[in-house]
Every structure is written in C-alpha cells, then in structure tokens.
Amino acid sequence: MAVSADLPRVIHPGLPGVDRVFHGSTRSIAVLVLVIFGSIGAFLGYQAIPTFHRYGLKFLTQHDWQPRLNQIGILSTLIGTIEIALVALIIAFPLALGTALFISEYAPARIKSTLVSLIDLMAAVPSIIYGLWGALLLMPHAKFVSRWLHQTFGFIPIFKVDTDPHAAVWAQSRYTSSAFIAGICVAMMVLPIACAVMRGVFAQAPLGEREAAYALGATRWGMIRSVVLPFGRGGIIGGTMLGLGRALGETIAVLLIISLAFDINFRILQAGSSSISALIADRFGDATTNQLAALLTAGFVLFVMTLLVNTVAAIFISRSRSGAMTEI
Amino acid sequence: MTVLQPAADTPIVSAAAQLPAEDRPRPLRKRTTDDVLSVIGSLLGSAALVWLVYFEILPLSGLVGFIVCWYFAFLAMYAGVTSLSHPRPVVTSRLMGAAVTAAALLVGFALFTVIGYTFWQGRFALPHLNFFTHDAAGVRVQDPLNHGGIEHAIVGSLIQLGIAVAVSLPLGLGTAIFMTEVGGWFAKVVRTVVEAMTAVPDLLAGLFVYVTLIVGLGMSRTGLAAAIALSVTMTPIIARSAEVALRVVPGGLREAGLALGASHWQTVRRVVLPTARPGLATALILAMARGIGETAPLLIVSGASTFMNANPLNQPMNSLPLYIFQGARSGQPLQIERAFGAASVLLAIVFVLFVITRFLARQRVGRR
Amino acid sequence: MLDIGHAPIILDEPPRNDERSLGNGSYLDAVNVSAWFGSAKVLDRVSLSMPPSVVTALIGPSGCGKSTFLRILNRMHESIPIAKLAGEVRLNGTDIYGPDQRVTDTRKRIGMVFQKPNPFPTMSIAENVMAGLKLTGTKLARSDRADVIERCLTRAGLWKEVKDRLDEPGGALSGGQQQRLCIGRSLAVDPDVLLMDEPCSALDPTSTRRIEETISDLMHDVTIVIVTHNMQQAARVSQQCAFFLAELGTPGVIVEAGKTKQIFEEPADPRTADYVNGRFG
C-alpha cells in the first residue's frame, strides 16, 4: 500500500447548501448592522468639516453659544458636561460599591436575588422618570443641601455661589438648576449600571480563595479586602467607567433640571450649567443649517468621548482576572 | 528518643463518646448575642444622644441633618462598643459592614422615592377613565382633568415600539447568531462595533436619523422616523444580550446535533435556539423596556401631536415619554399632573415587562 | 525500541474493495492519518482497521490523541478552524474525506456518543430519540415512530425504565440513563459505525456496567470503536485494542494493536506492557 505524503490535505467541507445560505445570510445581516453603525460615527464626523471650516478651532475654545452673533463654541458646554458627570460619579461610586458589596457579601441568601432584580429594575426605569423626580422632588429639597454646602464649605471655590448664604431670606433660585442637582439625578442612573457590573464581578471571586482567607482567621471585611476587592478590581474600574459613559450622554434629566447658561462655570452649586446633549436637544429646533452642523459636531465630540470611555472600560474589564467571565 | 505512646489500657474512643440514644443536629449560629445587641444598643444610644444635642442644645433643624448626624454618631458609638471587647480587625469589619449596609439602604430608599413619587403624583390624573380613552385634541392646558387623556400617546408608544421591534429583532438576533455560530475574525470585529454602539447616547441616534432621513431624504416627522430612531438604539442591545444567551448553550449540544448528521442550520434551529429561548426572550423584553422609555431621540425626530394618530407613515405621532416631557416642561400644574399620570402608566408598563423577564428566567431553572 | 511501523493493523486478510460491502457489517479503515492543530502535530501516520462484529478499543494515557483520532473518524475534527488532516478514512472502501462526500451523510453513517451525556434539554425522551431523524429532515409515519423509539431504546437498554414516561424532559434522567438515551438517539439514524468517546468516564460503576452490557449487545449490528481510559473496561468490552502513545513532544502514534487478549497478556512492546500493568497512567 502506497504511503501518501504526510502533508495536510484540503478538506472539502461538503457543507449542505442550506448551511451556505445560513452562513451567508447571517453574515449579510451582520454587515448591514456594521454599515449602519459605522455610518453614524462617520456621518457625525463628516459634519465636523464644515463646522471647523466656518468657525475654526475657536469652536473648541470659545465658550459662548450665540448663533445670531455668529459666535459658537462648546468650551463651556464641554466643561459643564464633565462637571455633571464627575459629580454623578463621585456620588454614585461609593454607593454603587457599597451596594454591590452588600448584595454579594452581606445580604442573606433569601433576598439576594430580589436585590439583584431591584438593581436591574433601577437600570430599567426610563430616564424621563428620573428627570421628573429630579426636577420636581429632588430640586426643592436639594437646594437646602446646596445652601448648607455653601455655608460650611464656601471657602472652596467650587462651592461658591454669588449670593449670601447666611441671609435670613436667602435667594433660593440661585441654588436651583445647578450642575450639582443634575449630578445627583444622573447619579441615580449611573448607579445601577456600575453596581450591576461590580456585583457580577464580586460574585465570581473564587470560593477557594475566600475559604483560604477565613481559614486564616480573617474577619469578613478582611476577607473582602484581601480576596474580593483585588479580584474585582477590573470590574470596579470598568463598571465605573461604563457609568461615566452613561453620565456623559444623559440628556433628559439634565434638560429638565438645569437652566442653560454658557459662561465657564466651575461653581457646581450655582444655577446655570450646560451639557452637550442638553445643548443639542434644546437648540436644534431653531438651528440654521450652519448651526445644525455645529450641533452635530458637538454631538460628534460627545460620541468620541463616550466611545473612548467605554472602550477603556471594556479593556479594563476584559483584562482583569474577573473579566473573562463578565458580560458588561 | 522516647516516642509518646498512649497508655496501654486507654481506649481509642473515649467513654464520653458512647453512642447517644438520639442523633439530633445542633444549631450552628454565626451571629452571637453580642453582635445583635451592640448594633441595637449603638443605634438607640446614638439616636438619643443626637436628638438631645441636635434639637435641644444646638439650634439646628431638618430631618436630613438629624439622620446624617445620627449615622455618624452611630458609627462612632458602634466602633467604641466593639473595641471594648474585640480586637481592631473586628472593629473595622463591623464598621465597614455598617457602612456597606447604609449605602444599600440609602440606594433602596432613593429608588423607593423615585417610584413612589411617580405613582403618588399620578393619583390625580389616573382615576379618570377619560385619561385612557381620550386624546388631547382640543383640550386647553387649563381644562380640568376630566377632559382629554393620553390615549394617543399610549397608542403612539405601542405602535412605535412594535415597528422598532419588527426592525431590530431580526437585525439583532441575526447578528447575534452570526457572532456565536459562524464566528471567525469578522465576528470579532462585529462584536467590538456592537459593544461600542451600546454605549452611544440615544440622543445621537436620534440626531443621525433626523439628519439622514428627515433632512436628507425629506421624510417628515412621522411615527416611522421615531420607530427607526428607537430601533437604532435597540438593535445593539438585542444583539449583545442575545449573543450572551446563545453562548451559554453548552457546546456539547451543538456537537451532538452535528454528530447525528444534521446541518449547521438544523442544529441551530432545532437545538440551539429552543435551548436559548428564555434568554432570548429576556433580551427582547429588556430591549423593549428600554425602547419604550427612550425620550431623547423622540425630542428630535418626533412631532408631538395632540390628536390620535395610528398611522406611522403620515403625520406626527405622540408617545408617552414625549408627552411626559412636554407636560413637565410646560410649568402648568394641570399639565404636570397629566404628565405624572402618563409617567405612572409608563412605569407600570416597564414593571410588567420586567416581571415577565423574571418569570421567564425562573422557568428555565424549573424545566431542567 | 521496537518500531511497529506504519502499516495498517489488520486482523484478517483484507478483503478486496468490492467484497467488503457485501459483508454483514461495515469496515472502517484509517490509513496513514495525521492530524495537526495549527502547526502542532498531534497524530503521526496512524493506521487502523476496525472490522464489524468486533469492538475496537483505543487505549492509552490522556493527551495522546485517542479522542482526536476518534473525531477524525466522523469528520468532527474539522469543525475546529485550525485543525488539519492527512491520510484517508475509508468506510467500506470509500474515503469519507473525498471531494464528493457530504459531511452530513458521513455523520449519519458514523455516529458518536460523547463523554458527557448531552440529551437535548428542550425535548422529551421520545423526542430525543427521534431527534436525529427530525434534525436531518427524515420523515417517518406516526406508527413507525413508536416502533423506532421502542426499538432504539430497547437496544440501548433503557426501554423498560422509561417506557411509561416518554414525554418527560430528556434532562430529567440520571447520568447513566442519559447516556443510554444518547446511545438510543444515535441508533435511531441507523448508523453503520458507532464511535464512543469515553462514554462511561462521567458515570458511576452501576451505570458503567449497564452500558458495557449494551455495548456487547450492539456489537453485532453496529461496528463499535470505543476510546477508554479504563484498561479493565477495555479488557472486558473489546476484542481488539490499539494502544496510543505520545511521548514528550512527539505526536501520538499507535504503538501496538492486536487482539485484546494478546495485548494484555503478551504485549509485544515494552511500553504496552508498562501501560497495561499500570506502571504509568
């Protein structure tokens, strides 16, 4: 019997025709989806050309938005977007971390799945509902907190407001519609996202390592600090960044709460703020073609920011130990 | 070297270990009386202390301030009590336990106020039957609540959602099947793009539709345009969740199908998809819950009509989120009450969808 | 070091091509089969003849390519994208990797039972048995269906236990019962050859015994090739054995093959002797 040459042979898959159709049609659907989504980014980016052509680089450094005076710049809007997102993150991060730890480590087993469901429910509530809550329930009460912050910590520049906090009749309207209150409301939307990712990661901390810590005599917090938190580091950072991405893009709640203002304002307690998405939503209605292009360019800037943040989040999550099993 | 040996006549099993008459398990308790009492004691003690100082001695007022001060006083007292009889790691552990529990309680409380406030404020508009059966045509903003309703908004939301599902479900599911079943380097590219797209703010999806379809193609602001904007947001969500649901199907089942001589398509259709059905249904329903609450793209793409319009191709179509937004923005008290009624309806729909997903998830466990 | 060489291992004088298909069962021959995963070679010119009415056992330590070889026999190997293959696998004389061979047809004629029982969870017991026919689009009259189910489950040794609960979900059975259900499912498409990849390794001793009984019942109808880690099982169940070995860094080869009695009692190669005497595992 002749010994054939020992080289790999071409394998004819002999796939049935129906499989060729199957593979082909799913591939076409995927291509279609890719095209649609690619074109969103490309499209928004394309708008940047006429805008920079018309307004120049001052688009990014000018802070005023006066279409009639032909002065358009998104600097203050950009700063406002970041301010609101940061306030939201600072409030949401410890709460999300604490809640995630509570659910995964401290909650009794019977109610654990209910709590997980509650967090998922919190994520499912539409942002318009949070917006209503923020504008009509939170804002009237939060202005007292703002005032107290101004009274106690007013020496710190970001907490300054241009009115007298100690006056007997204090100017309530100066404390409403601020970045701070918008930040609290956005925090409510960021929290479930970050919390769900963190909790998912904590739940996967290996039982063997947990038992090793207990066997050495560690307390519950000692075990958490030495096993769960290091294991979950990728999920903590990733989940937070996912929340950040959400916070940057939130439109409705911000729109309902703040009053749109265009001075560069680092005073988060003071009325008047702005964010890119709120700007677009508010101004697109009576925008001329040029201003529309400018708004779309602002949208492109937002798009790039959220894309960057979420890509970094995905990298953190997938590179960490817990990442391989986590779905974000 | 002497090796210790047991005494010659010591039995290996001690006398005390004679077989008892009955074999009852003993209760194993992790929480000691000390744990429970120190918490309760600290809570009460700090409450009393802060009450005294806050209200009687210092001229402060306000419930929020009281609670905050109480919390910190509780932490201090709890730490103090624990440190009397336990070493430092235990003190730290208890304090962190208290902090973590407080965080969870605060979050739970906030969620409760959000949901409760919405339904509570909806109590003015909801009892009126006309709220559900009439639209808002010809109703002036100051008209009392027994005039007009949100029927047009509800119908509009449902129609837009229906069209959006009809578009995004095949696209999302097809993409998910491609990613898990066909695979390859291209599937990795698709997955990266789909994940990136889930992060895009919904406002931008609306902008895109606005500029391409409405300004570019001259389409007017119809229900169809709104539905397309919604499906742009929903497709990546469905694609990603469906991919997860499909990936969880054990590879052994696919192999078994192929080993029987079935084509790939047959295996997917008759083995993989039915096995993944609960997960796929959950993915769809969660996307629906997200889609029905989307507001930002509707602000841009949709016109807010006041009259009932069930035709997505012609004339603007109102929807629940848009109606709520405009009601809230109007500043008119009756409109705001109507907006809350609509918000309660929206929240109730999201609830129902959510409960269905939990039910489906539990069903899968039962079947196994 | 004895080099057995790479000639095909056969028991009897090989019948000519045309004679084989006239026989009562199916001959499966592997001729100079080599396999790669990417650039790593895992099998080196393995040849083996698997005649009908004989249970062929593939034994050897883990990681030496037995399962890979088995999966080449029913064209499951190529479902891994980086897998490559050389040589031929002939079913009754025809190379199953030939350009005009449909992979789905091959798999209908060469069935496989896996290590971990995998009944389809969304189907009942009866539907699982019929799954092979339904998946390949073979239609059966309703009356025939009941016959097929009973016949296959009886051959698999499961009928008596489940005949009253055919509509229960396939996943509700014990491990051993699930594996017998999978055997029944494979039998429903009427294969010529049945490949079994360590079918009992996930099961308890009682279930293992039942399945070994099933194998001896089936062996006259279906050519059986079984991969097993368990030497005693190979000795109990098979009539001919092939001993696979992959020494450190080299691809797997068949060191020795022959009648089971001879392999276990008078192995020709010292490595075989070491393995069957438990000196390495």
Image (cartoon, coloured by chain):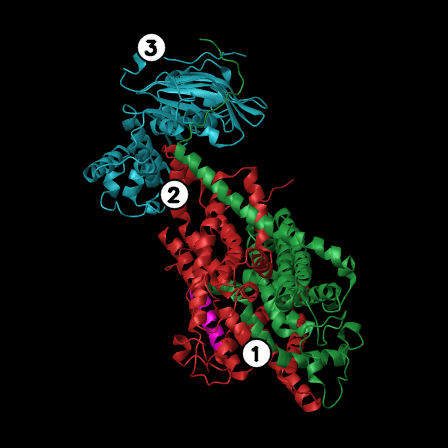
Which residue appears at 37% of the width and 22% of the height?
Answer: C56
Residue at image mark 2: B269
Which residue appears at 51% of the width and 82% of the height?
Answer: B141
Q: Nearer the viewer, mark 1 or mark 2?
A: 1
Q: Which mark is residue C15?
A: 3
Going by the numbered disc 3, the residue's amino acid type is Pro
Cα separation, mark 2 vs mark 3, equals 43 Å
Residue at image mark 1: B330
- Local secondary structure at mark 2: helix
Question: Seen in the image, is C222 located left or right of residue B136?
Answer: left
For marks 1 and 2 on the same chain, the one whose residue lies earlier in the sequence: 2
**Chain of the residue on which disc 1 is drawn:** B
Label 1: how many Cα within 10 Å (few below 14, some 14–19, many 20+): some
Magenta stretch in the rendered image? B340-352
| Picture colour for chain A | green
Q: Is residue B104 visible in the rendered structure shown here?
A: yes
Label 2: how many Cα within 10 Å (few below 14, some 14–19, many 20+): few
Disc 2, disc 3: CB below 8 Å?
Answer: no
Cα separation, mark 1 vs mark 3, equals 93 Å
| Picture colour for chain C | cyan
**Chain of the residue on which disc 2 is drawn:** B
